[in-house]
Image (spheres, coloured by chain):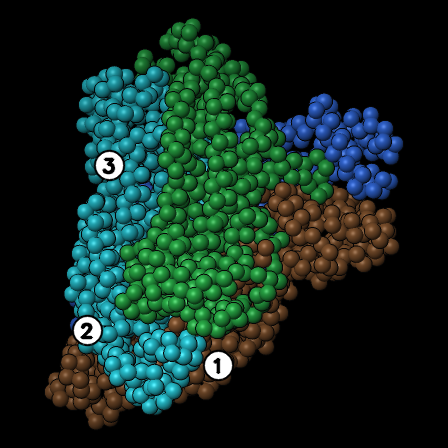
Chain colours: A blue, B cyan, C green, D brown
Amino acid sequence: MPQRLIDALVTTDAASAAFSDRALLQAMFDVEAALARAEAAVGIIPAEAAVVITRAAVVDDDIDVDTLVAQARAQATVSIPVVRVLTTRVEALDAGAARYVHWGATSQDVFDTALVLCVSRAWTQMAADQARLTGALVQLADEHAGTVMLGRTLLQPAVPITFGLKAAGWLGAVTRTWRQWQQALDNLQVLQLGGAAGTLASLGSHGLAVERALADELGLAVPDAPWHAHRDRVAAFVAACGVHTAALGKIARDLSLLAQHEVGEATVPGGGSSTMPHKRNPSGCAVVLAAATRLPGIVASVLAGMVHEHERSVGGWHAEAPAVADAVQAAGSALASLADVVLSLRVDPARMRANVDATRGVVMAEHLALLLAPAIGRAKAADLAAQASAESAASNRPLAVVVAGMAEAAAHLSTGDLERLASPDAYLGLADAFRRRLIDAARTSSDGN
Amino acid sequence: MPQRLIDALVTTDAASAAFSDRALLQAMFDVEAALARAEAAVGIIPAEAAVVITRAAVVDDDIDVDTLVAQARAQATVSIPVVRVLTTRVEALDAGAARYVHWGATSQDVFDTALVLCVSRAWTQMAADQARLTGALVQLADEHAGTVMLGRTLLQPAVPITFGLKAAGWLGAVTRTWRQWQQALDNLQVLQLGGAAGTLASLGSHGLAVERALADELGLAVPDAPWHAHRDRVAAFVAACGVHTAALGKIARDLSLLAQHEVGEATVPGGGSSTMPHKRNPSGCAVVLAAATRLPGIVASVLAGMVHEHERSVGGWHAEAPAVADAVQAAGSALASLADVVLSLRVDPARMRANVDATRGVVMAEHLALLLAPAIGRAKAADLAAQASAESAASNRPLAVVVAGMAEAAAHLSTGDLERLASPDAYLGLADAFRRRLIDAARTSSDGN
Amino acid sequence: MPQRLIDALVTTDAASAAFSDRALLQAMFDVEAALARAEAAVGIIPAEAAVVITRAAVVDDDIDVDTLVAQARAQATVSIPVVRVLTTRVEALDAGAARYVHWGATSQDVFDTALVLCVSRAWTQMAADQARLTGALVQLADEHAGTVMLGRTLLQPAVPITFGLKAAGWLGAVTRTWRQWQQALDNLQVLQLGGAAGTLASLGSHGLAVERALADELGLAVPDAPWHAHRDRVAAFVAACGVHTAALGKIARDLSLLAQHEVGEATVPGGGSSTMPHKRNPSGCAVVLAAATRLPGIVASVLAGMVHEHERSVGGWHAEAPAVADAVQAAGSALASLADVVLSLRVDPARMRANVDATRGVVMAEHLALLLAPAIGRAKAADLAAQASAESAASNRPLAVVVAGMAEAAAHLSTGDLERLASPDAYLGLADAFRRRLIDAARTSSDGN
Amino acid sequence: MPQRLIDALVTTDAASAAFSDRALLQAMFDVEAALARAEAAVGIIPAEAAVVITRAAVVDDDIDVDTLVAQARAQATVSIPVVRVLTTRVEALDAGAARYVHWGATSQDVFDTALVLCVSRAWTQMAADQARLTGALVQLADEHAGTVMLGRTLLQPAVPITFGLKAAGWLGAVTRTWRQWQQALDNLQVLQLGGAAGTLASLGSHGLAVERALADELGLAVPDAPWHAHRDRVAAFVAACGVHTAALGKIARDLSLLAQHEVGEATVPGGGSSTMPHKRNPSGCAVVLAAATRLPGIVASVLAGMVHEHERSVGGWHAEAPAVADAVQAAGSALASLADVVLSLRVDPARMRANVDATRGVVMAEHLALLLAPAIGRAKAADLAAQASAESAASNRPLAVVVAGMAEAAAHLSTGDLERLASPDAYLGLADAFRRRLIDAARTSSDGN
């Protein structure tokens, strides 16, 4: 009874594939096969058994998922029925080998480690989308180094900035949050192998050797101790996923605002309407923002679930894997969609300039106040600038013109000052310095990865 | 690429079926067919067209879900490709009729109304499970009216209660929360039909008639106005779902605590372990608590998503349907699982009594203090009772025996008092009165439904 | 060490007063005094004791809050030290009466009931602000019944609506969510009195009489049973608070978008900038949206906290009261702020019209398609309309003019059709009908309250 | 109108002091004074002005917080009225200097940087509590290296572990989560200085120099660019706070479970009851778990708030500071409380052993199955072990005795095997190896800090 349509906007094919029945089963089979090989290498199960188990551990269409799901619910763990299926498959090849399936491990060992593998496998596509996104942002930031636009605070015109700086700011945020998410992934890529309650007593004196060998088989690190009841690595990963997705959401919100008909500074290619032939919806932004709406709650669930009871919780653990899968899929969807949006974005520098000009220069009011302040003090200067702004708005005349006619102000301003008041380009401060620092930091970061 | 295993513990077959691709598609087709019939009845499309559309609006296996999903992502709405599929199907029967598919409606109309239908269809099984659960709780509450057990506060022995009261308390909570969820469902069962931006201009002078006819076709109420941008009904429904699931979670937590080996007052039939042959895990409780861990975050997401922009949001709406589906499935899973658990629960009154006795009567310390208070004041009485409790614990003698030996206390106690101090049954207060009130209220409530 | 500045934007004076130290203490004293009177009336404590306790139960500045806070932390309950303070105060008046303070009750009884009183007291100001808000919205909705503006979906022009409908939609949402919050308040206004573990054994045979008398004293209802461990009423109240605040947030978001310089359809009086003399920030909207950002997480916390252990939880209960206070304060802040904003809102119908006109009529593309569809089919009609829209945009000519020049389209359109295509006012559908229904429903609702 | 009582269980004196009105005001004054000195050093304001501003920037009791709060609400920022207050104070000393207050900065610069200072100042006490906690955990882990106890999964007996391992597991988790929180703090300790919209245009050519000088004055790092609209550092800090608090919560939950009367393995010194003289409540655990219940929602709010609009958001930013203060206070409260609890914890090794023995050896069932498996296969061995466990429970005889009487099993077991089955100490696997690795890792980590 697959559910794909209802989740269509909060996942992608690649992201959902990483957590599909087939992928999860294969990851669990991979863990079991690697365990057998590790145990054979250490000498606690026969080498031939490991060969047979490895051979049997290939998922195909014969597996009855309906039954697995029903049994998983009854046992509150997916592993028990999956181990049973694998055992049956091994038995069909070699009854002797079947007795060594899952040797010394517990359900959670297999499931947790398999989940780590699934997450790792989802990462590849996300890393590619992150690279597409940051590449496109670097290009935008470079291309529009000199494109002047309104800085907007509380959705009102503030002072001029450049679109290059804006794009570089986006780049900086998603680079930092990705790097931290990557570190959280690194921390998560550890083996879980603790046996029944985290002592690996089932492996007698061979525990450490099997642990090392299994970790090597799977390309995972060995943690200080099994983490069955300590879920900080998972929670930190999901939290970092939430921070990254929020950073993506901020970009999508900015773009959807720039794409408003009344603003018109960006065109975001997108979807149509089932009834309005003229519509060009920023559908890619909607997909990103859907993920950003979804993630905070998922993070909250995973944090709440961390408060485990003793050596394995009642419920906390059981809620975790679906949340991890939801989080990664939503983040993957946001990444893929935002990369598409930014790569096909069309920016309209002329409209950006027109929107600056439409303020009649009141965005230079701060500049005016600063020009006047040394002479008449900050408070008085701000008053005059506010007065000039109001008059500019009321009379629909440029601020510089209004100011030129205000004796009290004009007395303290040179002709050059008045010219600068009419030139937003002359009031960009460190826009370009910050832009360059952001790009440099992003480059350094991706070199490091 | 179905994902069922990873979600196995947070849904059921019935709950996931309600949001399956087939169910969602059929619900959308149902809305389109009903719209056509409504419009035919009103006279704005030909009656034959409605007949053909209704005939074509039957989901079968030929529909290519892969393509639908891809197009849904591109358009940020499932409806556009689904309408296209339906149109093609109608065209195959009668090209003339095809032009009347989706007449005057917009994507969101179809999707929102279909979502309401899916939720309504999921309700049937949940109502059955709720009835199973409350039936079992009433029986427990009746059967154990006189079963004395420890009341426990902050997980420490408090004063005696009855298991009948405890079960009735659970019953009361889940009855209240269900009733409120049901009301929220009633409020949600309204038509969404607003056209492009909520004015139904597309239907000219026929809007009100179509609205009425369509609501009747679908068995939904007509709202004051289209609710495309006002999602309070959905959010209130999901919030009530969260409250109900938390009430279920409280029961599961209590049961998992009672089932501890060291407590042993209840046996919760459950799952085994992949490695420990002796294990009897309260797996049903784990499933309920997984849902209770999952829901708060989902509620938070839906509330956050309510802050829509203008007549249709960018992202807020798009995050909603997956969250609704997740919420209903987790709640349905918790309900089904808890009903199973409670129906097969085995209670051990002897062990309950033994656990009371194991406190050596210190749970009667409040009673002791109250017996002494009239004579020596509340503070002094409490001090003596605390002293007696400590001595009882230190010397491992019953509280009543210790007290009999404390001159300061014994002076104010009759022989009957000392006997009562040794009888937890005599200190149950209103346990039975409250138990009966709770059961009566629950009965009244379900009569009302 | 008061913290008011850091919370300045998420509370109001009135809302924080309802949960101030003084208010909470007084509410707890009120409960204790009412308990004494109820017990005196029932005859289990002396009438004079109740008189003295009532006399002593007046909070003044002599209470050492530092000590209370420290002791509350040590005991994990505010009640124990507060009861001690009250007892000392009664003792100072009459040592005999002191022994009857808190007779038969437990800490949670006093605190929970006091919290209900605090919430009820916070309600008054909120109800006044809600009335101010809905009054202002009704007026806007009436005044602008005929003010045509853009309907905007996904932040893009859709079809024309009226501002009257938009305001009525806001009104409808906040009326519905308020009504439900009010019902949740009604459900919450019940006494908590259960004694040590919910049996009221401490009151012997007088429990029911005291319960009734105390509820009457406090103007609260008697619940079926004590609810110390069943927090559904609290959670439902906080959840309804979350839904209402989100409905307020939606209005604030719409207003902040309408107030953008580039849109200019509304002026939201607001704050300035510390550096930009020209700024007019929609600070009231920011305050509302801050609350809407804050609430979903609070709701999630309260839902998570509902999963209590047995008869009193370890932690779940302890997290609840601060969350309730936070929720009510944020909601109260949003209500007060939005009422102010809407009351002083200035709407610019001319600019609304200009923004419609600036689309050159492409918002009539749906109308065009519907006019053509009967003749040439829905699909072909949509294509032509899309083509005309694109040409209108490219050539900057009105849609009606473009269409008149397209033979394929013009052939099927009358002169009247072409005129209507140039008249957004003629394509408002049920805007006014819906507007009136929403206002009527809101009126009915407030009559009912 | 201070609110301290209602928050008594979710903060501490030290933690709330860090965000008190006085502390926040002083932090803001500190930023303004440092800005003046930095600008004087760079030469854009007179050196004497900086001296006077620094002299005036000392918070005292004369500041009218009522007015500040009211103005903060009106402006949606605390900074504007605070800057005004400081300006007035400077004016009183030297009217000339007053004009240089807040030169070139914007409200958010001052507030964000001050918030970073407040957080940093809260850290000191938390670090001390963390050191107390980890010190106590190391000692417990060492002292109880050989204390055998039940491992418990899903709250049921699993296999034996040691309390030393359990304590070391707690230590490992809180060490890892603290280290990550510390890193998040390091990342957050950056200056915010961007002027009106992040370009620092107000400082003309001196921006970079002032930025560097101000960061040095305050002991903060210089970020790549102002982060007014990119809140990833704040969100990552709050998320790490949430992960750490959840790790604390897990310990508190374990302790409250061990302290149950029926388990009795740990005594957690705690609070009493207002009515039950015998009560010893784990109140410290309740305080920790209250924080763990509170945090997930706060994290969700901060993540949701990250989706800012353009260069300064409407609402997202405004909701952040209260959430940060709430998060740090709750975490600080949990840390302080858990350190107290663990330092005064009394562990009962004899009871731990008795609880193991009370299982009659069924916790050795896994061991039995593993002993039998090489001879008869894993499945058959598990069946026999399950059968023996059931018989042990039914007949109340030790597992080893039951097994000795089962021919099918006994045939494959040596006398030594049967002895080992009766010795939980002999089935501890890597408990001690893991314990040592965890302690070593924790030591390395704190050396590194």
Q: Of helix, strand and loop, which one carries label 2? A: loop
Apparent side of residue C87 relative to residue D32 in the rendered image (left or right): left
Secondary structure under tag 3 reads: helix
Q: Residues within 10 Å of mark 3 (few under 14, many from 20)?
A: some
Name the chain under label 2.
Answer: B
Q: Nearer the viewer, mark 3 or mark 1?
A: 1
Residue beneath the point at 44% across and 57% down: C115
Check the picture and name the quadrant holding the C terminus of chain C. top left
**Coordinates of residue B61 in the picture (x, y in percent):** 21, 39
Q: At which x and y percent is residue A140?
A: 60, 40
Q: CA distance from mark 2 to mark 3?
A: 49 Å
Image quarter of residue A199:
bottom left
> CA–CA distance between discs 3 and 1?
63 Å
**Callout 1: few (<14), some (14-19), or many (20+) C-alpha neighbours within 10 Å?**
some
Label 1 and label 2: CA atoms lie apart by 35 Å
Dot 1: element = loop
Residue linked to disc 1: D344
Q: In the rendered view, does B111 fall on the left or right side of A185?
A: left
Q: Residue furthest left?
A: D407
Is D259 situated above or below B316?
Answer: below
- Name the amino acid type tagged 2: Asp
Q: Is residue C187 visible?
A: yes
Task: Name which residue type carries label 1.
Answer: Ser
Same chain, marks 3 and 1?
Answer: no
Residue C253 in the image: above or below residue A38: above
Report the residue marked by disc 2.
B348
**Is disc 2 on the same chain as disc 1?**
no
**Residue at image location 39% in from the left, 9% down from the top:** C413
* Residue in the picture at 81% in, 52% down: D90
Mark 3: which amino acid? Gln
Query: In the image, B156: left or right of C121?
Result: left
